[in-house]
Image (spheres, coloured by chain):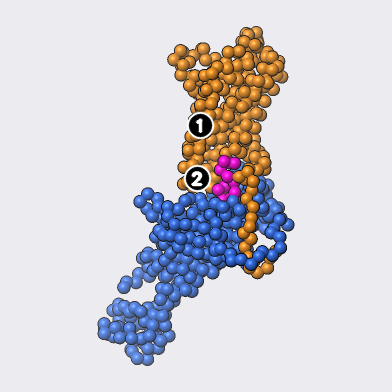
Amino acid sequence: MTQTQQGAPPVRTTPPAVELRGLTKRFGAVTAVDGLDLTVQPGEIVAFLGPNGAGKTSTIDMVLGLSRPDGGTAEVFGRAPRTAVAQGLVTAVMQSGGLLKDLTVGETVELTAALFAHTRPVAEVLDRAGLTDVAGRRVGKCSGGQQQRLRFAMALLPEPELIILDEPTTGMDVEGRREFWSAIRADAERGRTVVFATHYLDEADAYADRIVLVSGGKVVADGTAAEIKALSAGRQVSATWPGVGPADAAGLYNVAGVEDVELRGDTVLARTRDSDVLARHLLTATPAHDLQITSRGLEDAFLALTGQPSTTGETR
Amino acid sequence: MTAAVAAPDLERRVPPLGGFSPTFLKLEIRRLLRNRRTLVFTLVMPPLFFLLFGGLSDAYQHDTVGRGNVSAYLMISFAVYGSMLANTAAGASVAVERAQGWSRQLRLTPLNPLAYMVTKVLTAMVLGAISVGIVYAVGAVSGAVQLPTWAWVVSGLVAWLCAIVFAAFGLFIGYLVPSENVMQLLGPALALLALMGGIFVPLDQLSDTLQDLARFTPAYGVGALARAALTEDGATVGAVVNVVVWTVLFAAGAIWRFRRDTARV
């Protein structure tokens, strides 16, 4: 074992793993991060979800102290990002690059370990990342998956309390992604805080306790996957209603939960928070038939909240 | 391991000396020695040039220069050349590391950028020492070089230490040019600088204009100072000023570019 703090830690309030207040970053005329506020508590697994150019990477750079905010503050466990990095409290797995091709896998971990005041043993970290067999191999000759495991191993060396993953599974196959995430989850169960940026909706849905949706450098939604989905108003109900008129359609607004109604010829499309009530109404009180009820997923929420055109082609 | 959710352990040490580590230095040196192109440039070419330029020829062994012979002049010159190349190569390796994103990765560790630069300079000094050592070993084994023993030591040390100007030069270029092929650019540039520094041919064989110009080029000072033990007249104030000014200029340039680099990365 390596040295750890002796005895039980005294009872104290732990500062947030990440605290961003009014964080702002500009590149020339472009405001990449626009007064972003975010608090991540220790132990949370948070997905930082947003389209390309939403300001995810710029925000992460500031959390890691790789760039300075033009406005606002970023703190990691109540301290300046560079201090947190120097103490090994926060590490990150970057999207690509960041490895020297002419070092071996083992040397890369050995070198990284030498730079920290306290790390897990190199052999143990290599073993845990499944890299023992390729420890003598040059990094440049390793597969993409092996290189990603190496980045992960390097990030775990100082036993960080917070690990930040920037689009960590880009370029991985399905199997690789699944293995990667099961390793991350196993790790998070020990209390480590995980923040990952992604534009894969299914990843955010499956692996995060909490999703922070960013667009235009701001947080546009923040909650569990279910809460985010609910923000884009439940389900869509469509039905064929021969001879339906605008007055009939307007009447549907009186049904509990209905938020939006649209007519397309003899077809009625309605968005509702309670599809059961609307379906019962349509089938019992109107001549409507051929009912279809579709769930609006995270993707709809994503598109609706980030202001991107919906792929369903619906008009309002 | 701890069970369930443990309270974060926030009281942690920061490594001393900005994360400077002998392991880091060792691996940096190993990387350089593993690079075939660097090896050929810095450890094979200088002694080879010493032989090809006639270091063992009869005429040069009998031509006297100052306290020794022309073979000694060539040996010192090519030791300086090797030291120049070694220092530049080690310094310029930051270009490759920036291109591969390694510099950014290192910023995710406690390593202080200053400790990183110091490690680079020390790596350059080790490679430079090996390069000078090989040229001097070839000179000694050949038996062609005539030079007082103290002059071997002094010229060797000066050729080694004053080449620090090229470690600064390499770092500056390394931070200026984000390219993996920076040494292909620097090879010809260094050959030109070496020429102007009187490394390949004595400066008095150049035209007057070129001679005047040469005194202001970065290899002039280190060349003149290294040969001073042989020629008896090289340790001029101008040569010392040359080394100091160029080292300061290149170091300032490296720090300036480095600051911009870390602000952006």
Pointer 2 indicates a residue of which chain?
Answer: B
Q: Mark on residue B250? A: 1
Task: Describe the element under mark 2 as helix, strand or loop.
Answer: helix
Q: Nearest the camera: A309 or A255?
A: A255
Q: Which amino acid does label 2 sit on?
A: Thr
Q: Colour of chain A?
A: blue
> Per the image, is A251 magenta?
no
Q: Which residue is drawn at 51% across and 25% down?
A: B218
* Residue in the picture at 49% in, 47% down: B265
Q: Earlier in the sequence, mark 2 or mark 1?
A: 1
Asked whether residue B171 appears in the rendered view, the answer is yes
Identify the residue position indicated by label 2 in the image: B262
Residue B145 vs residue A287, the one in the foreground: B145
Residue at the spot 63% in from the left edge and 65% down from the top edge: B7
Does residue B55 show up?
no
Residue A298, given in percent of the width and then of the height, sits at 45, 70
Region in magenta: B106-116
Image-quadrant location for residue B160 = top right
Q: Specify whether B175 is left or right of B140.
A: left
Q: Position of residue A79 (x, y in %)?
A: 55, 56
- Give the percent coordinates (x, y) of residue B103: 54, 45
- In the rendered image, residues at marks 2 and 1 fall on the same chain: yes
Residue at x 68% of width, y 13% of height: B146
| Residue most extreme to the left | A246
Which chain is depicted orange?
Answer: B
Q: How crowded is mark 2: few (under 14 residues within 10 Å), some or many (20 or more)?
A: some
